[in-house]
Amino acid sequence: ARLARNEREFGAEGERSRIRHEGFRQGMYCRIRIDSVPATFVSGSNPKLPLVLGGLTPQETNLGLTRCRLKKHRWHKKILKCKDPLIFSIGWRRFQSVPVFSTEDQNGRLRYLKYTPEHMHCLATFYGPQTPPNTSFIALQNITGRTAGFRIAATGIALELDASFPVVKKLKLVGSPTKIFKNTAFVSGMFNSELEVSRFEGASIKTVSGIRGQVKKAIREGQPGSFRATFEDKILMSDIVFCRTWMPVEIPRYFNHVTNHLAKEGADGWKGIRPKAQLQ
């Protein structure tokens, strides 16, 4: 009954008219014309490898920073190191980028992580094409078929896009006293100029013995960067004074398309940047 109704509706043209109205159905063969294809893609194409066709929106052609939630795959043997290159397969794209791992503290600070946690999620920020939030992805360290073990290094989901993400890491500044007057002391070696001292005026400092203090004003005598500080108690000349602070981490602006289909050798013909372990 349905075939007869379709024949009456589409008339003599039959299947051609139906395709023109409702498009190609699943399971049908069709011919697609693609313009501006590189010559190396045709000469180096391997008919044994299937190709997946997809489209991009104008927004996805822009580059920017993406913050995502990432977790090392449980079958991957080694934990991942920060700023080691990873190949991301996200949406219709495959590209290599350098992620920076971090975790969010209770006060909203993005604290730098040197390695991924063993059995927990962490945040990763990388530079690449803008991806809609809630897009899942997988990450690999290389795409060659000679890798021993499980190749998928991590999985995750994109969270948000922005021009910058303030990832910070701990920094300990160390100085030593040059003169001591009861609870006041002159400290040098912690800063390099009066400008740096002015930025840290009022900052909390501490000695190794546990005596707390505060940065006051820069002084002109002594080496550049010396300052006057007050403490809760009299310190000793042998005490080391340190200041705990945070410094921003620069996210590498590196992005490289995976173009293994343009090489005759396939995956072995594409070369990306190598991790630090292979360079040493």
Image: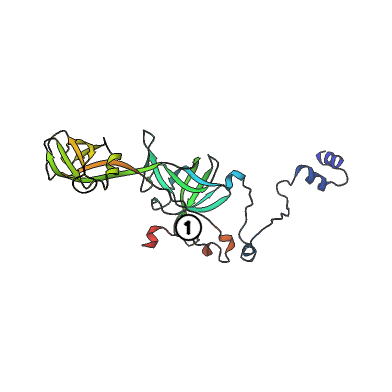
Quadrant location of residue 244? top left
Q: Position of residue 139 (x, y in %)?
A: 48, 50
Q: Position of residue 56 (x, y in %)?
A: 62, 47
The quarter of the image holding the N terminus is top right
- Please name whichever residue, 251 or 23, is drawn nearer the observer in this view of the structure: 251
Residue pushed farthest right?
12
- Please name whichever residue, 229 or 149, is drawn nearer the observer in this view of the structure: 229
Pointer 1: what residue? 142
Position above or below: 121 against 253: above
Q: Position of residue 115 (x, y in %)?
A: 37, 48
- Horizontally, residue 125 falls left or right of residue 174, namely right
Position above or below: 230 against 278: above
Tell me how the rendering is colored. rainbow
Q: Position of residue 76 (x, y in %)?
A: 42, 52
Disc 1: CA contacts within 10 A as few (<14), some (14-19) or many (>=20): many
Quadrant location of residue 168? top left
